[in-house]
Image: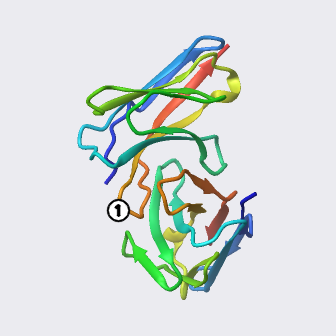
Amino acid sequence: DAKTTQPPSMDCAEGRAANLPCNHSTISGNEYVYWYRQIHSQGPQYIIHGLKNNETNEMASLIITEDRKSSTLILPHATLRDTAVYYCIVYGGSQGNLIFGKGTKLSVKP
Amino acid sequence: SQTIHQWPATLVQPVGSPLSLECTVEGTSNPNLYWYRQAAGRGLQLLFYSVGIGQISSEVPQNLSASRPQDRQFILSSKKLLLSDSGFYLCAWSGTRRTEAFFGQGTRLTVV
């Protein structure tokens, strides 16, 4: 089973920041938080990952709480092309498998 | 750079027929390899993963099997397809040291 909990859906206005939450209260010390997104009928696309520090790249920012039990993916200026299902995944350590939960369906609206 | 190839893109097969989907990775060695299935309107289900040649772990018992005959080749097979095997099949690879996973473009299988 997935080790993360996400809201099933969210809406965001185009041009505004999209903040997608994720709970991972059972994360262990050597596990990373990864975010992927899947646009309809395509393979998932890697967005960002982090261990305990906040991370930023050209796609998004990842904010991880100090206790590492939750995180937030931030798309600073959402566009219509950001409409997708966003998956938060806990992965790493000695585990070789990458388990996806149900994700959050983000709808960016004009 | 690393690339992942998965084929075919679409496939229509009759019930009871065999299946073989192939996935190959280029530009890396000793990758972790994964097969996922996504049924219509549902999430990604991990079917198999492999950390090395001949090493296959099954996450869900089913009508499918996987093999890894070479380091960068991962094959998904079935001897007799069922209607319930229809779905979107995705192959992925990741590095062995907690790196991100990269997905192929997927195969949309319809069993009729």
In this orientation, which residue lies closer to the viewer: A34 or B42?
Answer: A34
Q: How is the image coloured?
A: rainbow
Label 1 belongs to which residue? Answer: A94
Residue A11 in the image: above or below residue A39: above
Q: Chain of mark 1?
A: A
Number of dots carrying numbers: 1
Q: Residue at x 38, y 69 (%)?
A: B59
Q: Which x, y percent locates residue B9? A: 74, 64
Q: Residue at x 63, y 51 (%)?
A: A43
The C terminus of chain B: image quadrant: bottom right
In this orientation, which residue lies closer to the viewer: B42 or B102?
Answer: B102
Amino acid on which the number 1 mark rests in the picture: Ser
Q: Which x, y percent locates residue B19? A: 62, 81
Q: Classify mark 1: helix, strand or loop.
A: loop
Q: Quadrant of residue B23?
A: bottom right
The N terminus of chain B: image quadrant: bottom right
Visible residue check, residue A66: yes
Residue A95 in the image: above or below residue B51: above
Task: Tell me if mark 1 has few (under 14), some (14-19) or many (20+) residues whose alpha carbon lies within 10 angstroms of its own.
Answer: few
Residue B23 in the image: above or below residue B79: above
Q: Quadrant of residue A70?
A: top left
